[in-house]
Image: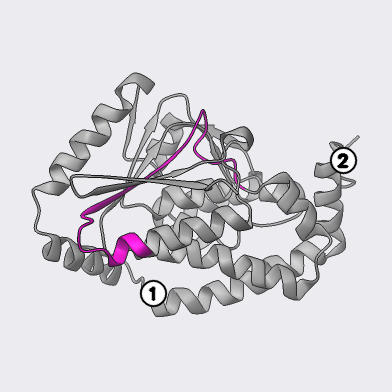
Amino acid sequence: MPSAVLTTDRAGVRTLAMHRPEVHNAFDDALIAELTAAVEDAGRDPAVRVVVLTGSGASFSAGADLNWMRGMAGASEQENRDDSLRLARLMRSLQFCPKPTVARVNGAAYGGGVGLVACCDIAIAADGAKFGLTEVKLGLVPAVISPCVVAAIGLRQARKLFLTGEIFDAAEARRIGLLHQVVAPEALDEAVAFALKLLAKAGPQAQREAKQLAFRMGGLAEAAAERIDRDNAALIARLRVSPEGQEGLTAFLDKRAPAWTAP
């Protein structure tokens, strides 16, 4: 099986590229497992100063893979809970990675892809990128990624986007705090390189402490996050097997409108 994550190292910078371009780097079990292991390994490796997360091809990440969603639609509540906990571990590992993290958002990010962007310390995107938290359209909620998204954009913006499931552009993503910078596609690498240059000037121990300081001042703690993840995994598992969740997922897979939409 080809790797779902491409890893490159250069001058203390480890770049992790989600590598499923044929499905816009959508999540499946393999990608979640590989990316979690890669993030955790980078966090432990003393040779790594900074982690850059990006996507291969035209997209950053389209969120859940279609076949993965099909499997989860037919899975038990316990299986859905276990699946959600694996995704939660990925988000938590990225959020609390002891190294500085940079999201190089080369294209669209939906669902869990938005979660990955929100987890990174610095997020820079090409101006054509689109974003969306579209779970409610499937009768679901963005439960697993909600802690990092709310931390990034605030409660007020999260309430609107969680409820509407609307698609928004990079300019709006920057306005609400999901992104720090938006540039033309041809300037994306230069913008990331400038951020890496700034990060390279700081002491690595000071950066670790600064990151933990920010979390403490923001009321975030990894142990508490793990407890929240368990509750959110139970929530999304319950919704996936509920009649509304089953109808939403089935309608999406059948490419039809769900029963609750107006004719």
- Numbered disc 1: secondary structure: helix
Up the image or down, 104 lies above or below 98; here it is: above
Up the image or down, 27 lies above or below 186; here it is: below
What range is drawn magenta here?
Answer: 41-63
In the picture, the disc for residue 222 is: 1
Residue 125, quarter of picture = top left
Residue type of the residue flagged with mark 2: Asp
* Residue in view at x 80 percent, y 51 percent: 249
Q: What is the residue that sits farthest to the front in this orientation? A: 1
Label 2 crowding class (10 Å Cα cut-off): few <14, some 14-19, many 20+?
A: few
Residue 205, quarter of picture = bottom left
* Residue 164 magenta-highlighted: no
Horizontally, residue 64 falls left or right of residue 112, namely: right
Residue type of the residue flagged with mark 1: Glu
- Of the two numbered discs 2 and 1 on the same chain, state the one appearing first in sequence: 1
* Residue tagged 2: 254
* Residue in view at x 87 percent, y 40 percent: 254
